[in-house]
Amino acid sequence: MSSSAAASVWARIRLADRRDVPNIHRLIRQMAEFELLTHLFSATEASLSDTLFPSPALPPFLSFTVLILELSHSPFSEDSDAPLFAPIVRRIDLESAVEDPEAAEFASPRGEGIVVAGFVLCFPNYSTFLAKPGLYIEDIFVRATWRRRGLGRMLLAAVAGQAAQMGMGRVEWCVLDWNVNAIKFYEDMGAEVMPMWRICRLTGPALQAYLHEK
Amino acid sequence: MSSSAAASVWARIRLADRRDVPNIHRLIRQMAEFELLTHLFSATEASLSDTLFPSPALPPFLSFTVLILELSHSPFSEDSDAPLFAPIVRRIDLESAVEDPEAAEFASPRGEGIVVAGFVLCFPNYSTFLAKPGLYIEDIFVRATWRRRGLGRMLLAAVAGQAAQMGMGRVEWCVLDWNVNAIKFYEDMGAEVMPMWRICRLTGPALQAYLHEK
């Protein structure tokens, strides 16, 4: 989407497919930069494609699932190829025209001047206390240009609505304790930030050391 | 397993099946009591059975997976019905005979005087930075009578070994920040306890509120 004087845009959340991998890869890299975690970033387009979009495809929300957030200056044409997840479309009012300096880099594979503005990646988790599956959000990200316009809320609400529709018990995700803007945003959306739980991670050589115990 | 003068026991980790649901339910209840979280416990045997052991069964470690820890005073007979996960068996030396006051309650459905001493429940997660799946451990639990004998280590090592064998990038789980014994145990096993991440949870009416956004 080029610079424009339009005072509103159309936002669409749809299921991602293999053609979205280059944009997903760029979005994840930006997220790693924002979280000051680029030293942990080793994903390639090929490795993302192999692990997120296996053949045959698994049904969405029963395995790793990516939803893509796209923006367009004109209404989206009907996406008849969406039997598994009906796209969610909203009109977003802008206070003034927005210049997107990354518009060319993040052009949508769907064409028509559509740009990719963010994504969410989730997969099923399970609560033994509830004896119910839930959804875990591994990543939720909106590019800097498009923040503070309700788009992050729209992504999170898409996952929450899906979980509720599927009769799941919880949606969970993690936040860095210094990211006070994100914490405020999540609490405003009804989430509880749990103070007492800490994440434990076994990775790299420490994980490989257990191979011999098989 | 009744009270016995034996100074060692055999421990086996095997894939759980539907017949293990009553014991799994009792173990989860004990875990909720230990974590002071019984107010969050609403699982029933029926709801556990439906959600953990759907028909047709999914391959282990690609969806919700329960491994059961059993103890026997005599060597286990060969489990020829285990094509999906080869049971892990260790001989555990005891300093003195152990009286298990819950032995009758936790009798194994496999009979032969075998008792169930614990379990681990895990499922796949995904790291976008690594572009690799991993395993997330939702629960790991050993009954109080049998703690501090290397059995928790055996359960965690079983999951870690499986993840390493499958080429996965990480094993992750959560710990309560006041559970210093668990934190020490996990660190000794090579895990990093991550200080800055907090879990966000959307559940109950706050989650149901998003149903209308679908």
Image: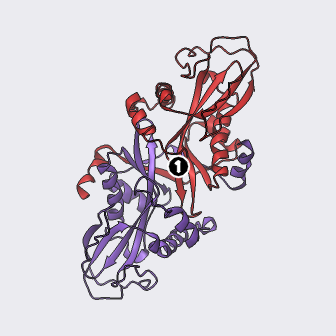
Chain colours: A red, B purple
Can residue B104 be seen in this snapshot? Answer: yes
Q: Residues within 10 Å of mark 1 (few under 14, many from 20)?
A: some
Amino acid type, mark 1 = Leu
Residue A162: x percent and y percent? 64, 46
Say which residue appears at 53% left-offset and 57% top-offset.
A126
Residue A30: x percent and y percent? 50, 26
B35 or A191: nearer the eye? A191
Quadrant where the N terminus of chain B lies? Answer: bottom left
Can residue A143 be seen in this snapshot? Answer: no
Q: What subunit carries mark 1?
A: A
Say which residue appears at 40% left-offset and 56% top-offset.
B59
Quadrant where the C terminus of chain B lies? Answer: top right
Which quadrant would residue B91 be assigned to in this image?
bottom left
Check disc 1 and report the residue beneath it: A62
On the rendered structure, is A74 left or right of B96? right
From what the image shows, is residue A132 above or below residue A68? below
Residue A175: x percent and y percent? 56, 41
From what the image shows, is residue B145 above or below residue A133? below
From what the image shows, is residue A169 above or below residue A155? below
SS under mark 1: loop
Say which residue appears at 65% left-offset and 35% top-offset.
A87
Residue at the extreme front of the image, as rendered: A80
| Numbered-mark total | 1
Residue A183: x percent and y percent? 63, 40
Say which residue appears at 75% left-offset and 16% top-offset.
A96
On the rendered structure, is B169 left or right of A126? left
From what the image shows, is residue A208 above or below residue B51? above
B11 or A78: nearer the eye? A78
